[in-house]
Image: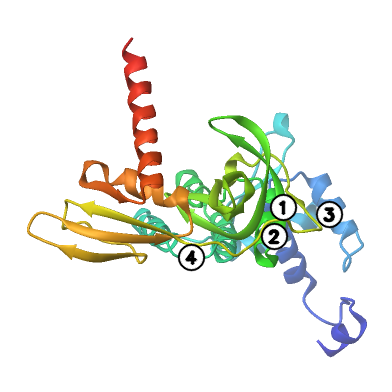
Amino acid sequence: MKEFLKSKKVTYNLMSFTGFKSMLLLSYLMEAPHSYDEIKQYFMENEFIHESISIDTLRVYINSLERLGCEIKRGRKAEGSKYKLVAHPFELKITDEQIKSLIKVFKSITKSIDVDDLLSITKFFEKISQGITNIDLKLALENISPLKKLNPEILNALINAARRNDEITILYNSPSSGAKEIDVLAEKLVIANNKVYLKGISSEYKNTTASFLVSRILETPVVKLNKTISSDIEPLVIGCEIYDKNMPLADNEKIISEDETKRTIEITSDNKFLTTQRILSMGSSCKVLYPQSFKDEIYSVLKKMKEEYIAEKV
């Protein structure tokens, strides 16, 4: 070992070459099936080996691995006679019930975890999935994260922008008006309903906090050198009547008064979009009392929804 640490070279004096090359072969076959010529080339190009192996020597290494519990089969000649690692004792074994528990825990923590941490956990699950041969379980783990289908370049740029509180220009595919450029003072990325949103102050919405679905951002955002959006905004205070007294309140909601039939609450928020979504999610169990401007906006949204449903029937 001292010789290796000093020279960084493997020599016959250091270890059993049979064991070392067997482990190299195992590592190579874990990536994909390979032919004898590919294996021979792999050994020739290895920084520690730099020598070819005969077909008889290859059988010695395969026998060594099989004694460890590996199962290696040679494919048909028509398919290239490739050696395939069918099974090995180092495979990660996770049952269906364990996978379901992992998915349940994962979905639970995504409600409160930072996107940076979620990105790390996503990569962790991807590594776990590599050691699983059950295709259904592998796909379940690989697709568990809401980050999975997002453009990684765009996602990383948004994470960095939020971390530095940059003012950025995004090309956003708005569901109502199509693709357009929007300036945003990036604050943070949040997860809601298993979707990732960019939260920030936007001039598009009269310098109030807004949320943009990351999957609708079409290109890598451009950082603006000179900031034009102020971070000083007045929070929105909304009064509502809640008719379902069993409905749990969020952290930014407090009870002002209550009687046998209803509660009067105040919602303090700097994000009009998320507050609108919250109120709409409560349906007929919630009625906005003030301010009048926000009450008018809710009425306008409900009216538009009604008109679209009526149009579908025509």
Q: Spatial distance from mark 2 to mark 4, Cα to Cα? A: 18 Å
Marks 4 and 1 in Cβ contact (< 8 Å): no
Q: Which dot, 2 or 4, sits closer to the camera?
A: 2
Q: Which dot, 2 or 1, sits closer to the camera?
A: 1
| Mark with earlier residue (2, 4) | 4
Residue holding disc 4: 113
Quarter-of-image position of residue 297: top left
Q: Which dot, 1 or 3, sits closer to the camera?
A: 1
| Mark with earlier residue (4, 3) | 3
Residue holding disc 2: 161
Q: Spatial distance from mark 4 to mark 3, Cα to Cα? A: 43 Å
| Mark with earlier residue (2, 1) | 2
Res 42 label? 3
Depth check: 73 or 41 in front?
41
Depth check: 125 or 183 in front?
183
Q: Secondary structure at mark 2?
A: helix
Q: How many marks?
A: 4
Image quarter hosting the C terminus: top left
Residue holding disc 1: 168
Q: Is residue 146 visible?
A: no
Mark 4 surroundings within 10 Å by alpha-carbon count, few (fewer than 14), some (14 through 19), many (20 or more): few
Marks 4 and 3 in Cβ contact (< 8 Å): no
Three-letter residue code for mark 2? Ala
Marks 2 and 1 in Cβ contact (< 8 Å): yes
Residue at image x 22%, y 53%?
A: 241
